[in-house]
Amino acid sequence: MSRPVVESLPEKFGMVEWFRPGERERVERVLADMKKLGAKRLRTGISWADWYTSEGKEWYEWLVPRLCSEVELLPCVLYTPPSIGVEAKTSSPPRRPRDYADFIDLFITAFGEHFEYVELWNEPNNLSEWDWTLDPHWTGFGEMIGAAAHWAKKRGKKTVLGGMSPIDGHWLCRMFDLGVMEYIDVVGIHGFPDIFDYTWKGWGRNIAMVREILDQHDSPCEIWVTEAGFSTWQHDEFKQARVFLEFLEAPAQRLYWYGADDLDPGLAAVDRFHLDEREYYFGFRKADGTPKLLYRLLEEGKVTALKKVGQVATAAPARAGSTAEKAILVTGGAGFIGTNLVHHLTREGQRVIVYDNLSRPGVEENLLWLKETCGDRLEVRIADTRNHLALHDAITQCSHVYHFAAQVAVTTSIDNPAADFAINGQGTFALLEAIRTAKERPSLLFTSTNKVYGGIEGCRIRKNGARYEPLDPELQRYGFGEGTPLDFLSPYGCSKGCADQYVLDYARSFGINAAVFRMSCIYGPHQYGTEDQGWVAHFAIRTLKGEPITLYGDGYQVRDLLFVEDLVDAMCRAGAMMPQISGQAFNIGGGTDRAASLLELLELLRDLHGSLPQISFDDWRTGDQRYYVSDTRKFATATGWTPRHSVREGVERLYSWLCQSMSVPQRPVEDTKTKSYPASGVEAM
């Protein structure tokens, strides 16, 4: 697919990250991330208190040269050793203010070759960083910083006044009154729009106010934004990206963004432990290392990709009126299935709201394509289902909901079951509550999974050619029906099964018009498959790239495959018949006529591509079913639906789309109408 022209981060851009003694691996990871993003400046804390611990001096003797070998360093020296404070805490003024100047002298002697500027303290008008109740008029602070700045200038260093948070003109005037500014080269300011700065006026107005004060005192100081950021504690990763774009436009000589990583939830923020949850979520990455939307868009396309997605996500104004005037809401609407459904609905003249947090890599390409092809019938809201206010607002605008937003991988659910449940279980519950409490309740179709049936261990199977088949003739003929016992194997099965049951119960207990699709293997265009989810597309992508494919298990496991256009047809029928089918679950897939094993699917790809990459095998994965085929008779009877695309037709369509999107020449294929399928040659490899 075409890539945007890359717009790099501006030269004045830098990062802020704080490191605790011993975090060498995290230092290396942050430096690697900065290199990927093209960030060449780093502001970090140098703890006066940590220096005098048993490991402190050795830590900084490693840290400072290591950082400066990769980036331009701005050291911020702060935190009083508790033993010499007016009170025994790091935010306390020292009993002898000039002890700080002595430490600055020591630090410059040890590391001065590595930096040009030194920042003197951090957020001195923030009570948690400098306890001004012990120094009510900042007189002690002024003496401490003035002496340190004077000495730093004598040692040949330029000085940065610790960034104000919040930006406070009165406090800056006090620094002039105390004579501190005579030795200062740069005034630092901080900004956290809508997080800590409740009356945020924008970077332009705030910086202009600081510049006016400097001009009134004939000060030549530069103004730097030494720290800015946005906490995603309310799951609003897109707003973090928007705030970042505004930050890049700030009229300051340098800009430092906080930060690289979310704070480890097991650690205290400054001297507090989870007293303010906002402090834990300022990173480009989550605490487990997962990249957030901002980082991923910057990594993939730098500022250009970020701006393009931002331009798409301009919500249309709220529209009052009857149910007929309302939109169809598709959560997870930029995903594979959502993209196909949204495109179909808008072509049919429907107004559609896509509600997606863009957490899955690649879906922003789907979103941009939808905006280009769907025009003004499409409204985009980049938000998380756990953001209850955003969700409630979207619900008021719609007459029907297709709920696709989910964590979709079994392996991910095992690695992080808490996040899996928060997204699948709590996210769906939040949606149900938004519907239940709405003045006009929309109907709902929820996409569940065949994983709610677990491993189906009681199904006796045998090998037949390159696939498993059940011994039971009824299962051979029809597949598994909705009466199959539920068995929520794996955290993913549990979270989706929990949501599945809540949807059915809300239909019964509260009269919500809602139904459930327990889906088998869906595939088709706009699918960016991985080993964890979307295995048909994953195999096709790896084949086109010539990259190795790993089969978990023996490859004989069977799924029924349903082309996405057939699924879209089923969903539209379900939406149209919602009152009649409410409170019911339906197994949805290709059925026995469209079942294939992994080995058979690879043979089809070999036929289309001419060759296969290296195939290897690994252990079975938790919750994997050796044989699962959907019995779709219940839904077919209720709606008259039947799939139209054969496996070969569907896979050929997917393969052609991937060739086009990946700019890979498509190999001409011979007429295969008379060829038998499935084939069975891969097991000999």
Image (tube, rainbow, N blue to C red):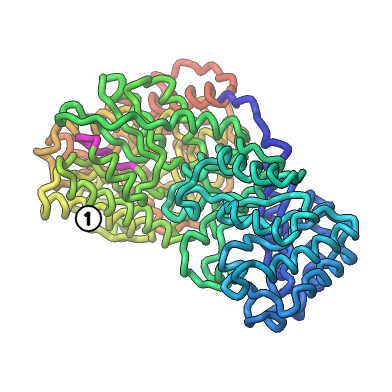
The image position of residue 287, as x and y in percent, is 55, 59
Give coordinates of residue 442: x percent, y percent. Answer: 18, 39
Is residue 402 positioned above or below 317 on the image?
Answer: below
Q: Quadrant of the N terminus?
A: top right
Query: Does 106 appear above or below 352?
Result: below
Q: Nearer the viewer, residue 111 or 365?
A: 111
- Residue stretch rendered in magenta on the structure: 397-404
**Can see residue 530?**
no
Q: Residue at x 21, y 47 (%)?
A: 481
Instruction: Tell me what residue is drawn at x 33 percent, y 57 percent.
Output: 495
Quadrant in which residue 18 is drawn: bottom right
Along the horizontal axis of the image, is 79 left or right of 330?
Answer: right
Q: Main secondary structure of the magenta part?
A: strand
Q: Residue at x 31, y 24 (%)?
A: 344
Mark 1, residue position: 501
365, above or below 273, in the image: above
**Residue 3 forms part of the magenta stretch:** no
Q: Residues within 10 Å of mark 1 (few under 14, many from 20)?
A: some
Which one is nearer the viewer's eye here, 496 or 639? 496
Q: Is residue 109 visible?
A: yes
Task: Name the quadrant of the C terminus.
Answer: top right
Q: Amino acid at mark 1?
A: Gln
**Horizontal and vertical percent for residue 514?**
17, 44
Q: Is residue 88 left or right of residue 411?
A: right
The number of numbered badges drawn on the structure is 1
| Disc 1 element | helix
Q: Please tell me which residue is depicted at 86% across the width and 62% down the height of the picture.
A: 111
| Depth order, front residue of 408/378 | 378
Viewed as shown, does residue 340 lie left or right of 665? Answer: left
x%, y% of residue 551? Answer: 52, 47
Residue 124 image-quadrant placement: bottom right
Q: Quadrant of residue 76?
A: bottom right
